[in-house]
Image: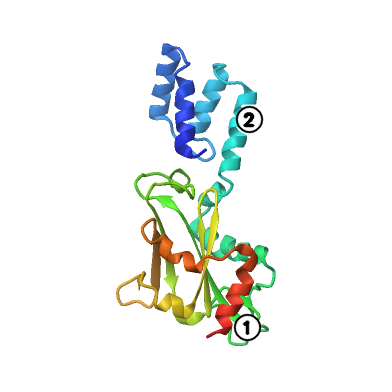
C-alpha cells in the first residue's frame, strides 16, 4: 500500500460519514495546519475513529499493512545531511563491518577526502531517495515504491572522482534499497556525469526512470558489496 492507495482507502471510508460530519471534516482539512507527526492523515483517522466509522482494530491492521509495505519510508523524513553523510556511511558498515571509517592510522594521507576504507581501497558513498517529480509536498509525500510507474529523480551530487578508488551509490525507495558500485574510472566515463556548478570541480550523476536500466551492470547485492568494492578498487 502506497500513499495514493492509503488516500483512496480513507476517501472510501469518509463516504460513510453523514452529510454534516462530511462537510465538517472537509472544512477542517481545508484549514488544517500540519506539524510532524500531526498531519492530515492522522487527523482523518482520528476523526473516523471518533465517529465510529472504523474500529481501533481496523486502524491497527491498516497501520501494520502500511508500515510493512513501506519499510524505508522513515528515511525520507530525515534531513539531507543526516541521510547522506550519517545514515549512508553507517548503513554500509552495518552491511559489512570490513568497511571502516578512515583515519590516519589506516591512511597516513587521509584528510577527510573520502568516506570509508576497505583493506586499502578508498570508498566514497553517495545516497539518494527516489521521489515523484510530478507532485509537490514533503519528501515523504513524494516518496515512491520501486515498482511505481511515476517519474522519479535521484541526483548523486558533489562527486569528485579523483579522491577515491570506488563509489557506492545507494538508491532508496520506500520498499527497496539498491546498491550500485562504480570504480572512479567508470564514474569519469559515465555518460550521465555532468558538472554540478559552472567552472567547479564537483560533478553529478542523475538517475531517472529513463536511464536506470543502464546502471543495471553496476547493481550489487548487499552480501557481495565488499567483494565487489575490493575487486574494483584493486583493479585500478
User: Which residue is label 1 attached to?
Assistant: 120
Instruction: Kindly state the secondary structure of the residue where label 2 is placed.
Output: helix
Please name the residue shown 47% across and 48% down the image: 147
Q: Nearer the viewer, residue 80 or 206?
A: 206
Which mark is drawn over residue 171? none
Residue 154 in view, yes or no: yes
Q: Residue 4 sits in which quadrant?
A: top left
Instruction: Tell me where residue 3 appears, x and y as whole percent.
Output: 47, 38
Q: Is residue 70 left or right of residue 147?
A: right
Please name the residue shown 42% across and 67% down the image: 157
Instruction: Tell me where residue 97 appears, x and y as whole percent.
Output: 69, 69
In this view, the residue farthest toward the bottom is: 108
Image: 207 above or below 70: below
Residue 111 in view, yes or no: no
For marks 2 and 1, the one nearer the N-term is 2
Image: 169 above or below 147: below
Q: Residue 222 sits in which quadrant?
A: bottom right
Please name the residue shown 64% across and 79% down the image: 103
User: Which residue is label 2 attached to?
Assistant: 60
Instruction: Tell me where residue 29 appears, x and y as whole percent.
Output: 42, 27
Amino acid at each position: 500500500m502506497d500513499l495514493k492507495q492509503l488516500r483512496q482507502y480513507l476517501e472510501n471510508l469518509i463516504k460513510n460519514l453523514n452529510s454534516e460530519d462530511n462537510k465538517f471534516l472537509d472544512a477542517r482539512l481545508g484549514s488544517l495546519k500540519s506539524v510532524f507527526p500531526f498531519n492530515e492523515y492522522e487527523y482523518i483517522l482520528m476523526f473516523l475513529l471518533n465517529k465510529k466509522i472504523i474500529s481501533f482494530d481496523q486502524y491497527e491492521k491498516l497501520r501494520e499493512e502500511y508500515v510493512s509495505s513501506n519499510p524505508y519510508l522513515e528515511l525520507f523524513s530525515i534531513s539531507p545531511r543526516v541521510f547522506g553523510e550519517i545514515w549512508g556511511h553507517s548503513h554500509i558498515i552495518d552491511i559489512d563491518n570490513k568497511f571502516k571509517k578512515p583515519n590516519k592510522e589506516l591512511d597516513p594521507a587521509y584528510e577527510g577526502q573520502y568516506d570509508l576504507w576497505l583493506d586499502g581501497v578508498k570508498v566514497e558513498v553517495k545516497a539518494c531517495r527516489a521521489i515523484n517529480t510530478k507532485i509537490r509536498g514533503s519528501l515523504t509525500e513524494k516518496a515512491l515504491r520501486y515498482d511505481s510507474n511515476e517519474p522519479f529523480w535521484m541526483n548523486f551530487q558533489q562527486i569528485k572522482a579523483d579522491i577515491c578508488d570506488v563509489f557506492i551509490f545507494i538508491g532508496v525507495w520506500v520498499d527497496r534499497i539498491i546498491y550500485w558500485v562504480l570504480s572512479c574510472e567508470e564514474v569519469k566515463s559515465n555518460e550521465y556525469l555532468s558538472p554540478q556548478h559552472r567552472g567547479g570541480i564537483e560533478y553529478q550523476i542523475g538517475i531517472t526512470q529513463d536511464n536506470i536500466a543502464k546502471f543495471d551492470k553496476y547493481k550489487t547485492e548487499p552480501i557481495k558489496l565488499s567483494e565487489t568494492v575490493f575487486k574494483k578498487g584493486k583493479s585500478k
